[in-house]
Image: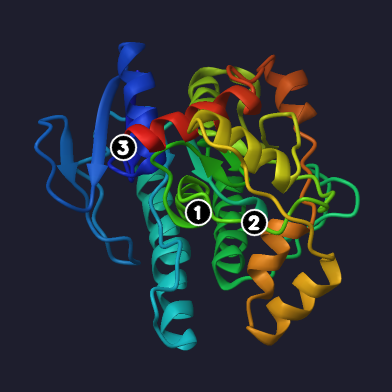
Amino acid sequence: MKVLITGANGFVGRGLVSVLRSECHQLVCCSRVAVSDHEFVISPPLSADADWSQLLTGVDVVVHLAGKAHNLGEPREVAVQGFKQANVDGTVRLAEQAISSNVKRFIFISSIGVNGSSTEGAFDESSPAAPHADYAESKLAAERKLEDLNRGSSMELVIIRPPLVYAAQAPGNFKRLLKIVSLGLPLPFATINNRRSMIALENLVDFIRVCVTHPKAANNLFLVSDGVDLSTAEIVRFLASGMNRKARLIAVPQFLLLAGSTVLRRRAIYTQLCCSLVIDSSKAQSTLGWAPVVSPQQALTESGRGFKAL
């Protein structure tokens, strides 16, 4: 099977390339920057007028990982336009050309942010969309346009909404948490009794691997996670264990953390660290027979160990 992967040189992409390569798939690994690996090719920019036609020749499955994920200090209106251009217009253009090239299946990696940033119960595939960030808004817009586009075609669509993806080399907020834990700085989460669904990199790439070929994945939406939800304090303890460090957790009342984050205009960080976000990923298991290949306890400990080695 010939599989085109966008964002193949990224955090998730590298892991997926390794897994699919081991299964002897023929890969078209697309990167926005030059890579010494001969298997990688320069991809067109994610935009409404990109030309993917040559790269899509003979491709059976597209796994679309690439996109704009962060506001890099831009004015909000500039960032919103960037999200639209890359995540919506660029995705639709790729899907349109995939249909023209007779691609059989299009796998779109979206975000649990489409459902929201926190839960009282748990998100599942029937939960309403309620994005709270510009990035998540763009992912939802892309999902809807892909669904509209797909109704008139024979190409199968698979949408995956993962939560935070983690490993030793993870970027963003998880990298910052790894750094803080490695420095032995005290963290105010000792009495925070939240539950957070996340997904280890190994588990996400294994789930995508299953979706590449499984017939029952066709035209389905999946919310996927490690299947075990941990508190922020537990996450810190497992990371610290992997680093051979003692987790320095102190008790700070949650209302003080909320007040401080509000004053500092960091409510999003408070939500991520102190509130719950729980995913019911039972559909992925019952429909596809998939199970996580690694537990979060094991993966977090290994993330701490790997970060320390780095």
Say left or right for 32 vs 157: left
Q: Residues within 10 Å of mark 1 (few under 14, many from 20)?
A: some
Check residue 300 in the rendering and tell me which mark sits there, or answer none.
Answer: none
Element carrying mark 2: loop
Q: Position of residue 44 (x, y in %)?
A: 22, 56
Disc 3 target residue: 310
* Type of amino acid under label 1: Ile
* Type of amino acid under label 3: Leu
Disc 1 versus disc 3: distance between alpha carbons?
A: 15 Å
Check residue 180 in the rendering and tell me which mark sits there, or answer none.
Answer: 1
- Measuring 22% from the left and 40% from the top, which residue is drawn there? 55
Disc 3 versus disc 2: distance between alpha carbons?
A: 22 Å
Q: Position of residue 228 (x, y in %)?
A: 75, 30
Say which quarter of the image contains residue 220.
Answer: top right
Q: Position of residue 76 (x, y in %)?
A: 49, 85
Q: Would you place residue 39 above or below residue 191 in this image?
A: above
- Measuring 13% from the left and 32% from the top, which residue is drawn there? 37
Say left or right for 244 vs 36: right
